[in-house]
Image (cartoon, rainbow, N blue to C red):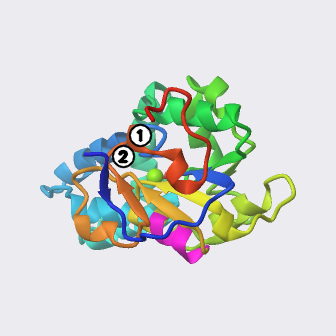
Amino acid sequence: MATISATGSHREPVTHVIFDMDGLLLDTEKFYTEVQEIILSRYNKTFDWSLKAKMMGKKAIESARIFVEETGLSDSLSAEDFLVEREEMLQKLFPSSELMPGASRLIRHLHAKGIPICVATGSHMRHFVLKTQRHGELFSLMHHVVKGDDPEVKQGKPSPDIFLAAAKRFEGGPMDSCKCLVFEDAPAGVLAAKNAGMSVVMVPDPRLDISYHTSADQVLSSLLDFNPTEWGLPPFDDAKS
Ligand SMILES: O=P(O)(O)OC[C@H](O)CO
Ligand SMILES: [Mg+2]
């Protein structure tokens, strides 16, 4: 089934599109999950999706603090030491990052039709470079990329900072928030987009609790299921009438 849920029956036509990156364009959330499971197993603890839901989409240090506090490890493992330990493993995994289904098709379609597109990711510059090194041509189609360590991003998602910065940097910006459509996979990212006054399509991992779907304007099981015309965007050339 294409659409999991659509909370808003009335959709404002949009003119600009902002993509999240990790877990939405790139299949990188699995790397974070893998290394966090390894670290927790040293303490005879298990990682689960209720913790994952709280961490994903956030800046590294913000999610690290959540990790050590929620797992009860803060007395034996600082957020900073957790990041050092995680980093060694992540650096080996990120260069093999693959695209999520439908990401290339949607980016190329919107770019070809002249729709301004950009990326707003909680990832900092060094991780962004590692993750996108096999996808440079595709990411070059973005008008701009706002990263988590950008000076204008004072607070990570669910703060609206990153999406407001992204809307500001389009040609002729700042764009009206109501004209911007955000694609997100993370609960914090969906809230950030709503806090910025934007519409948001959520493409969540199926393991995420469905209670996190309620803030999104539309929930899809894959980017392949997105219908641009529902949002006033040009149809795919191969769309069936
Ligand atoms: O989902 P993103 O692209 O905002 O990235 C956030 C973190 O780096 C990973 O959860
Ligand atoms: Mg994400």
Which quadrant holds the N terminus? top left
Q: Between residues 42 and 4, which one lies in front from this camera angle?
A: 4
Q: Amino acid at mark 2?
A: Tyr
Q: Is residue 106 left or right of residue 52?
A: right
Q: How many marks?
A: 2
Q: Residues within 10 Å of mark 1 (few under 14, many from 20)?
A: many
At 28% across and 42% down in the image, what residue appears? 34
Please say whether residue 193 is one of the residues in the magenta stretch: yes
Q: Quadrant of residue 172?
A: bottom right
Give above or below for 99 relative to 3.
above
Pointer 1 and pointer 2: residues touching (CB < 8 Å)? Answer: yes
Residue 21's spot in the image, x, y percent? 52, 46
Asked if ligand 1 lies within 8 A of label 2, the reply is yes
Element type where label 2 sits in the image: helix
Q: Quick one: SS at disc 1?
A: loop
Q: Nearer the viewer, residue 30 or 218?
A: 218
Mark 1 and ligand 1: say if the CB distance to the nearest ligand atom is below 8 Å: yes
Query: Is residue 123 highlighted in magenta?
Result: no
Q: Quadrant of residue 4?
A: bottom left
According to the picture, the residue beneath numbered tag 1 turns out to be 28
Residue type at the position of mark 1 = Thr
Task: Write down the region rendered in magenta.
Answer: 190-196
Could you say which disc has been placed on residue 226 in the image? none
For residue 208, side relative to residue 166 (left or right): left
Tag 2 residue: 32
* Residue 120 rendering spot, x and y as whole percentages: 61, 53
Does 102 appear above or below 24?
A: above
